[in-house]
Image (spheres, coloured by chain):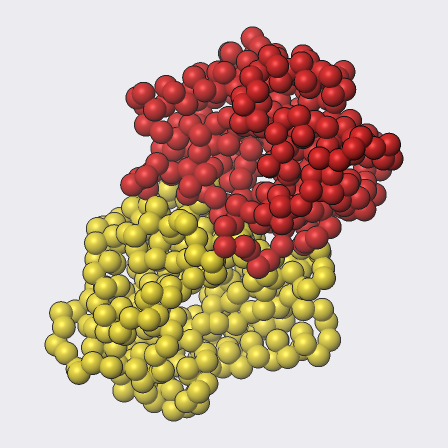
Chain colours: A red, B yellow
Amino acid sequence: MSAPSTSSAAHPRLSLNQATIKYADLDQALRAVADGGYEAIGLWREPVQAVGIEESARRLADSGLRLSTYCRGGFFTVPEGPARRAAIDDNRRGIEETATLAAAGAPGSRAVFVLVAGGIPAGSTDLVGARAQVADALAELAPEAQAAGVTLAIEPLHPMYASDRAVVSTLKQALDLAAPFDPAVVGATVDTFHIWWDPEVLPQIARAGAEGRIATYQVCDWNTPLPADVLLSRHEPGDGVIDFASLTGAVGATGYTGDIEVEIFNQELWDAPFADVVARTAAAFEAAVVPHLAASVPLSVVE
Amino acid sequence: MSAPSTSSAAHPRLSLNQATIKYADLDQALRAVADGGYEAIGLWREPVQAVGIEESARRLADSGLRLSTYCRGGFFTVPEGPARRAAIDDNRRGIEETATLAAAGAPGSRAVFVLVAGGIPAGSTDLVGARAQVADALAELAPEAQAAGVTLAIEPLHPMYASDRAVVSTLKQALDLAAPFDPAVVGATVDTFHIWWDPEVLPQIARAGAEGRIATYQVCDWNTPLPADVLLSRHEPGDGVIDFASLTGAVGATGYTGDIEVEIFNQELWDAPFADVVARTAAAFEAAVVPHLAASVPLSVVE
C-alpha cells in the first residue's frame, strides 16, 4: 500500500487486530502494521488460510511483529451431528494454527485463540440449551488447547448479538464458563465494545484478573445511531461514549500488562487506505487509552 | 377504523399497549381494543395529552377497559439545572395523570407509571454518573408517587439502548435501584424484549416477585436481522427467538396474576389497520404466551 516509512513508534502495548483493515491480505496487513510502528498484530483465520499456515508463520516471523491473538473460533451452538463435528474439528485446526503462529511471532507472542460462542440455532428458542453446547464444546477442546499451549479466549458479545452470533453476553457468563478449566487454557476476551454497558463490568474485570483469565484486552468505542448493519457499529477509541478511564484502569489494576488490541468493524475505516487506518488508530489509542495505562501498575482490586 | 364487532373475547389478562397501534388517537385506540374483546389497555401520554387528562379519563371510563400501565416518564439523565427540573416536573405531572386515569378505568386498573431512565448526556462518557442521576430522581419522585398511590415502574432496556435511551440495562439493576423504596411505590417493568438474553433473568424475575416489584409484565419477541432503526425491532410473541415458556413461567411462579401487556414498536404493524393488529396480537398471545400461564399458580421460586 504505502512505501516503508520511518513513522514514529506506536505505543508498545498497542496491537492492531487485522479486522480493522479487513480488506488487507496477510502481507498488506503485516506491512501496514509494522510500517505504522506497531509491535504486535492480531490475525484472522481467513487471510492466514488464504496463504497457508506454514507460509503465514514465515511471513509473521519476517515481519518482526508479536502475535497478540488469533481470531477466531467457536460457533458451537449447532445440534450434535455432522455440522457440530465439523465445527469442533475446525476449532481443533484453529488451536493448532494459533500455536504455530505464536511460535513464529516475535518474543512475547501469545497463543490466544478467540472464541465466539454462536447464536441460537435457526427455529429454536432454546437459549439455555445453546449455552450448554458452548460448555460442552469447551470441555471437548480444552485438553487439545492445553496440549498445544493455547489459551481459548471466550468472548462475551454485546447482547444485541445474543440471538444470531453469541449466546455468551456478559463477562460474568464467560468467566463462569471458564471456571472449570485451568486459566492458562480457558480465559476471556475483555472487549470494551461488548461489555461497557454492564453494571457488573468493573467487579467482573477485577474477578477476571484475580482468576488469571484476561486472555486479551480489546478496545474500541460505541456510538449511536447504530448503522443499518449493527455488526459495523464500532468506532475508534474516543469517538463514542465508552469510559476508557474506568475500564482500562480496572484492567490495569488487575496487573494485566499484555497487548491491547484495537479491533474495529466499520465500513468507513475498511474503505480507507490501510496506512491511514493504522496511523489513525495509533493516534486514537494514544489519546483515549494510553493516559489510563498508568493504573497498570498492579493495585488493589477494583471495588 | 372498523365497525363495532362482537369478536370473541381476548384472554382476560391480555392488555394492548397503545404503542402497538401508534398512529391511533385515544378514541381509536380505546375502541379498537374494546372491540377486539380485550379487557385492558396501556395508554401513552402523547395521545392522552392531545385530548386532555380529564377528558381522557372520561373516555377511558366509557370504554369499560382497565388501565394496565401509563407510558411513560423518566429521562432523568440530564445535569442539574432547568432541563432537569423540567424533566422532574414532567414526571410529577405524569404521576398525577396516572392516578387520574387509573381511578377512571374499570375495576382492577393499576396506577403504574413506566419510567425509562434516559441515556448518557451528549458529549459525556459518565455512565456511572448518569445512573446516579436516575437514583436521585427516584428519591425525589417517590414521595409524590406514594402520595398519589402510583407505582413507578423502572424499565430496564436492552443494552443496545444504553447510550442513548436508558442507562438501566438489566432487571437486577432496576431492582437494585428500587430497593430503597416501598415496593408499592417503586417497582420494575419486566419486558421480555429487553431482558430475554440475560443469563441472570430467571433468578432476577424470582427476586422481583419475592420483593413484590413486578409492576407490569410486557411481552413481545426479538428477531434478527435488526431493522435499520433498532427501536422498531420488536415482533409479535412467537415470531422470534424468545422462550416465553421459561420467562412467563418464571413470572407466573412468583404469583404475579396481573395484566400482561403486548407492546410492539414495528413499522409494519404501525402501517396495518388497528383492528387487524389488535386481532393478530390476541392470536399471537393465545398461541405463544397463554399456554405458559398455567404456571401462574404460585409455585416455589424458580431456581
Quarter assignment of residue A279: top right
Quarter assignment of residue A241: bottom right
Give the quarter of the figure containing the N terminus of chain A.
top right
Q: Is residue A37 above or below residue A161?
A: above
How far across and how far down the image is residue A143, in percent? 51, 11
Which of B86/B61 is in front? B86
Q: Residue at x 78, y 33 (%)?
A: A3
Q: Residue at x 69, y 22 (%)?
A: A67
Please state if B114 lies on the left or on the right of B8 as rendered: right
Q: Is residue A181 visible?
A: no
Which of A279/B200 is in front? A279
Give the quarter of the figure containing the C terminus of chain A.
top right
Please state if B98 lies on the left or on the right of A54 as rendered: left
Quarter assignment of residue A295: top right
Which of B192/B214 is in front? B192
**Count of numbered circles on the image:** 0
How far across and how far down the image is residue B199, in percent? 46, 40
How far across and how far down the image is residue A229, in percent? 50, 50
Q: Residue at x 50, y 16 (%)?
A: A93
Q: Is residue B31 visible?
A: yes
How far across and how far down the image is residue B286, in percent? 21, 57
Q: Is residue B118 above or below residue B57?
A: above
